[in-house]
Image: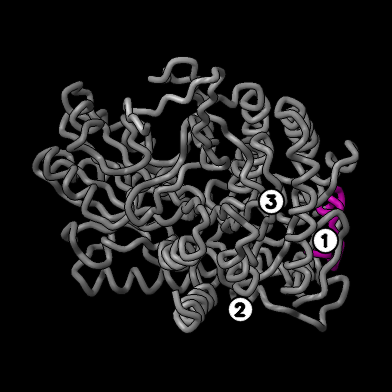
Amino acid sequence: MTMAAATLTSSRLRSVLSCRSYLLRFSLSCQTRSNMSSSAFLVNDPKYGFLKELGLSEKNAGVYDGEWKGSGEVVTSVNPANGKPIAQVVQGTLQEYNATVDKSNQAWRTWVDIPAPQRGEIVRQIGDELRKNLLPLSKLVSLEMGKILAEGIGEVQEYVDICDYACGLSRMLEGKILPSERPGHVLLEQWNSLGTMGIISAFNFPVAVYGWNNAIAMACGNTMIWKGATSTPLISVATTKIVASVLEKNGLPGAVCALVSGGAEIGNAMANDKRLPLLSFTGSTAVGSKVGVAVQTRFGKSILELGGNNAIIVAEDADIDMVVRAGVFACAGTAGQRCTTTRRLILHEKVHDEVVSRLVKAYSQVINRIGDPLEPNTLIGPIHTKVGVENYMNTIEEAKKLGGKIEFGGKVIQREGNFVEPTIISGLPPNSPVVMKETFAPIVYALKASSLDEAIAINNSVEQGLSSSLFTQNIGNIFQWLGPKGSDCGVVNVNIPTNGAEIGGAFGGEKATGGGRESGSDSWKQYMRRSTVTINYTKELPLAQGLKFE
């Protein structure tokens, strides 16, 4: 690539990373506010005492490399449930980013020399420290991101669980011994650490996505630089403080798990940084496609976890009670802000009306439980930003113009905070432009299909391929769904919703979802490099394939 082309690629990536992508943008309410009184911040309200339990204050350093620092832009984190400022974080500069990467590279030389089972023990201790802080950190997730407390607890628990998993994995990182065709030779595989990796996570799972990467990467011998979402900076700081306390207790360099809070400039630097052989990116398909190109241009490796236009197929013989119970959480839970949220219900024409009417009835009971995510009775919290609310409104209007019928919802709730009604829309064809795109909000489209073949074709027609589910009692339907002519997604479920993945399996999707895999199964291989090794333990030098060179 010429210097001009490289500059153009970097410029394009910077432009896209600067756009108002739904996973990596500031809302207007999340910008710097310099004239706030101390009493304005929720961190000083005794009601939110858990913030100080986590070591947070009014203004927090957003860079950690063994020491806390930060001299960049000051951003204010805002509670999406009431619009009030929580606290501030001082982001890092490019100079601080570059220095942090250098320190993390140096820390790798210490970390990689520690035997894998001992690294696993450090990860286990991180899990224990997370357990001690599970409730306050979960409350922070609810306060800053907006998901209900039960989901916040589940998210932090997911990090705890992956620490346990990675601890066991540290004793089972395996290679292969293969038969050699040459006498007196051994053929084997050796897996080694990559070095320092980058992690760019999104607002909707501000703890768990980092946890998947952090725990597995540490067991594999990597150090890391984390850039969390710009709108959930306090979660990044609090989580890093917990991890750092374990490293410090064990006399290990803090830069093993470094943090650089920042915006598009830092993200662009990470994508183009040859010192980071691996970059894990979670965000929109639009931004992820540019990140992937930038990383590939420098011959790095990337793990891309991007969008998902997920569908539940309901066959004619499905258990409708199960469908409705699963559908409420799958479609409306987390205010539609999971990458695995169900956005399309593909219903057999014989059960379409029943499913829609029963789902409308279920929604009518849930709508009274929308509110403050920290309150125990709440089932649905707010949209994360004002921009997200605008996207919701624009999508509703587009669907109506295209002929969609609002079966339920479709309105912004007039109260403080970013609250909207979970929405069901029917009457649109499966290939309608509004159906084909992902909107990060609680909107689901009820679509008709006359057969399983047609339903599978509709499922596979969108550009993303993250999660999918089929509700049926027919074993033939199940194996058709799981086979090569079935779902083209990375997650293929039967009689459960599209969301709620377990850590034991590899998580990720196909097509425009990015192809990355994180968490369980053999996802660890993406965090290491493989060498094929041949050892000759004789004095002879036979060549492979019987080649003679004499």
Residues at discs 3 and 1 in contact (Cβ within 8 Å): no
Which stretch is magenta?
49-62
Q: Earlier in the sequence, mark 3 or mark 2?
A: 2
Query: What kind of residue is marked 1?
Result: Val
Colouring convention used in this rendered image of the protein: one colour
Q: Which residue is mark 1?
A: 43
Query: Is residue 217 rendered magenta in the image?
Result: no
Q: Which residue is mark 2?
A: 28
The image shows residue 355, relative to residue 504, as above or below, that is below
Q: Is residue 247 visible?
A: yes
- Spatial CA span between label 3 and label 1: 29 Å
The image shows residue 307, relative to residue 160, as above or below, that is below
The image shows residue 163, relative to residue 38, as above or below, that is above
Report the side of 446 relative to 336 (left or right): left
The residue depicted at 69 percent of the width and 55 percent of the height is 225
- Spatial CA span between label 3 and label 2: 30 Å
Which mark identifies residue 224?
3
Report the side of 209 relative to 390 (left or right): right
Badge 2 element:
helix
The residue depicted at 46 percent of the width and 61 percent of the height is 296
The image shows residue 488, relative to residue 114, as above or below, that is below
Marks 2 and 1: which is nearer the front?
Answer: 2
Q: Earlier in the sequence, mark 2 or mark 1?
A: 2
Query: What kind of residue is marked 2?
Result: Leu
Q: Earlier in the sequence, mark 3 or mark 1?
A: 1
